[in-house]
Amino acid sequence: MRIRAVRLDELPLLQDIERAAGQCFRDIGMPEIAEDEPLPLGELARYHHAGLAWVAADDADSPAAYLIADRVDGNLHVEQVSVHPRSARRGVGRLLLERLAGHAAGEGAPALTLTTFTGVPWNAPYYARCGFRLMEDALLTPGLRRIRELEAAHGLDRWPRACMRRVL
């Protein structure tokens, strides 16, 4: 897999990857997550224009996974990382995270952050293996608090969630 910037014409493919990747949540009793619609094309375009959207492309240069990020309180925040099930368990997500880490270090950001489900094996436990550590709520920055509030308003707090941080 080759990591590269996403192209505008590929944004609908990102939505397809997100829908396919989300189906595994149905198998663990989280059908609402599986049915949650991906970000609209306009929102995905915003990440592209900000230079904060990457894909893992296969040998045919077709996206198999993607990552989008935001700048939050001086860090780069993983907004979404999704891997199509056909490419899962091959280190593709980790490659995308490493690309983001390199980009963040180049910008002088001290850390990567994300929010995730703590009880889902391919969420918090996976990110811990990638160098992220759980953050105590008392240590959340204002931007992370706002993200968690928005997630709660969207209903994501039906399942345990947390913020994680990876020092660069």
Image (cartoon, rainbow, N blue to C red):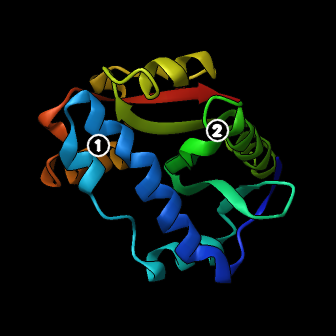
Q: Position of residue 84 (x, y in %)?
A: 56, 49
Quarter of the image where the C terminus is located: top right
Mark 1 is surrounded, within 10 Å at the Cα level, by few (under 14), some (14 to 19) or many (20 or more) other residues, namely some
Q: Position of residue 62 (x, y in %)?
A: 75, 64
Indicate whether 102 appears above or below 163: below
Residue drawn at the location 63% of the way across and 22% of the way down: 130
Residue 93's disc is 2
Amino acid type for the residue under numbered disc 2: Gly
Residue drawn at the location 23% of the way across and 54% of the way down: 150
Say what secondary structure mark 2 lies in.
helix
Question: Camera-side residue: 4 or 60?
Answer: 60
Mark nearer the N terminus (2 vs 1):
2
Give the quadrant of residue 132: top right
Question: Camera-side residue: 9 or 137?
Answer: 9
Residue indicated by mark 1: 145
Q: Is residue 125 left or right of residue 166?
A: left
Q: Position of residue 28 (x, y in %)?
A: 26, 28
**Discs 2, 1 touching: Cβ within 8 Å:** no
Question: Camera-side residue: 158 or 69?
Answer: 158
Amino acid type for the residue under numbered disc 1: Arg
Indicate whether 90 appears above or below 130: below
Residue drawn at the location 16% of the way across and 37% of the way down: 157
